[in-house]
């Protein structure tokens, strides 16, 4: 009899508990963050360049912005907007360079296509580049 009363008491106690699930929102930017080895091909100059890049997120949790540091191997930081596995580098003027482009994330590697205009050398043609960023 005592065992039956104990079992009923435990069941009553467990059935009265509320279970609260806390869902952590998924941030698409997490797939882009880190340190990368960059291989950049200039279609304009038919030249390969290798350098390191770092990507960090904007501090606003509700933002979709990331920052690409050492972009174009000239120590500038450009911002990009992330939407799923795609990113957009809106037209921006940073450190004398006019930059814009697009990119995608494929299994952790980033593929970027962009153009760069050097405002310090107006006679230089627009540099059209393709880059692969491989996570280190």
Image: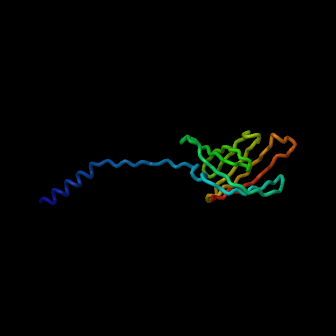
Q: Position of residue 108 (x, y in %)?
A: 61, 58
As drawn, the residue found furthest toward the front would be 75
As drawn, the residue found furthest toward the left would be 1
What residue lies at 63% left-to-right and 58% top-to-bottom? 135
**In this view, 121 is above or below 108:** above
Viewer-side residue, 127 vs 3: 127
Q: Quadrant of the N terminus?
A: bottom left
Q: Position of residue 41 (x, y in %)?
A: 77, 56
Determine which quarter of the picture holds residue 11.
bottom left
Count of numbered labels shown in the rendering: 0
What residue lies at 70% left-to-right and 42% top-to-bottom? 90
Q: Position of residue 21 (x, y in %)?
A: 40, 49
What residue lies at 63% left-to-right and 59% top-to-bottom? 136
As drawn, the residue found furthest toward the right would be 123
Q: Position of residue 31 (x, y in %)?
A: 59, 53
Which colouring convention does the figure follow?
Answer: rainbow
Viewer-side residue, 121 vs 93: 121
Is residue 36 shown left or right of residue 19? right
């Amino acid at each position: 009899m005592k065992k039956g009363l104990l079992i009923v008491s435990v069941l009553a106690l467990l059935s009265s508990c509320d279970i609260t699930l806390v869902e952590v929102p998924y941030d698409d930017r997490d797939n882009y963050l880190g340190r990368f080895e960059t291989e950049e091909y200039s279609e304009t100059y038919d030249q390969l360049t290798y350098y390191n890049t770092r990507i960090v997120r904007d501090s606003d949790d509700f933002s979709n912005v990331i920052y690409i540091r050492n972009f174009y191997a000239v120590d500038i930081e450009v911002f990009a907007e992330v939407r799923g596995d795609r990113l957009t580098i809106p037209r921006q003027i940073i450190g004398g360079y006019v930059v814009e482009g697009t990119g995608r994330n494929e299994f952790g590697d980033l593929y970027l296509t962009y153009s760069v205009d050097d405002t310090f050398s107006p006679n230089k043609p627009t540099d059209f580049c393709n880059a692969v960023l491989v996570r280190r």
